[in-house]
């Protein structure tokens, strides 16, 4: 087992109006890409590479949304979502599966496991933003990235 590597976005740490997203991904490149996407959307975020600490981090920081890879070493994303949904402090937090598993059967199995939503890799920032907006139910207060480009 390796230690958790978590960090909170520096620029958005003190911006309490924006939602906090916990992103759990074991591949550094994917985690970096996800953190860039979240930062560009104006979210505060915590990135974590170790799934074994996800429930503890979620209980401590109470994120507005969790983005969770499925294929993780140790505890899979499906194992983690089961633990999250059993905890009183985390059971209401929406959890999005972010995965390379892209078949219809994979999607159905993942959603049946307790995830609130699903996005397959690779994803476009607009698709990620749409899923984040949908799952945050109005708590996301920035313009769409593509709207900013049209101004």
Image (cartoon, rainbow, N blue to C red):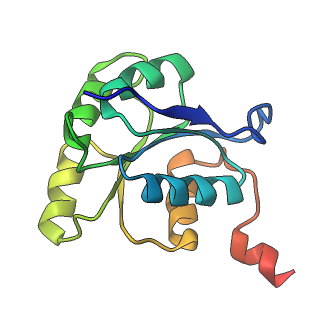
**Is residue 91 in view from this perspective?**
no
- In the figure, 57 relative to 12: above or below? above
Residue for point 76% across, 56% down: 142
Furthest residue toward right: 151
Image location (x, y in percent) of residue 118: 34, 58
Left or right of 53? Residue 66 is right
**Is residue 33 in view from this perspective?**
yes
- In the figure, 17 relative to 33: above or below? above
Residue for point 57% across, 48% down: 137
Left or right of 46? Residue 17 is right
Furthest residue toward bottom: 150
Left or right of 83? Residue 21 is right
Q: Where the N terminus falls, by quadrant?
A: top left
Most foreground residue, 10 or 77: 10
- In the figure, 63 relative to 41: above or below? above
Image location (x, y in percent) of residue 98: 36, 56
Furthest residue toward front: 2
Q: Quadrant of residue 9?
A: top right
Q: Quadrant of residue 51?
A: top left
Residue for point 36% across, 24% down: 53
Q: How many marks?
A: 0
């Amino acid at each position: 087992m390796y230690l958790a590597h978590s960090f909170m976005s520096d620029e958005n740490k003190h911006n309490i109006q924006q939602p906090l997203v916990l992103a759990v991904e074991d591949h550094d490149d994917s985690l970096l890409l996800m953190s860039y996407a979240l930062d560009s959307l104006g979210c505060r975020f915590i990135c974590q590479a170790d799934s074994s600490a996800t429930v503890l981090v979620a209980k401590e920081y109470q994120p507005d949304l969790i983005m969770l890879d499925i294929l993780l070493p140790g505890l899979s994303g499906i194992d983690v979502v089961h633990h999250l949904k059993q905890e009183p402090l985390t059971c209401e937090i929406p959890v999005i599966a972010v995965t390379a598993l892209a078949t219809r059967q994979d999607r159905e199995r993942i959603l049946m496991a307790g995830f609130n939503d699903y996005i397959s890799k690779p994803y476009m920032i607009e698709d990620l933003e749409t899923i984040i907006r949908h799952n945050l139910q109005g708590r996301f207060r920035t313009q769409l990235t593509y709207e900013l480009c049209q101004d």
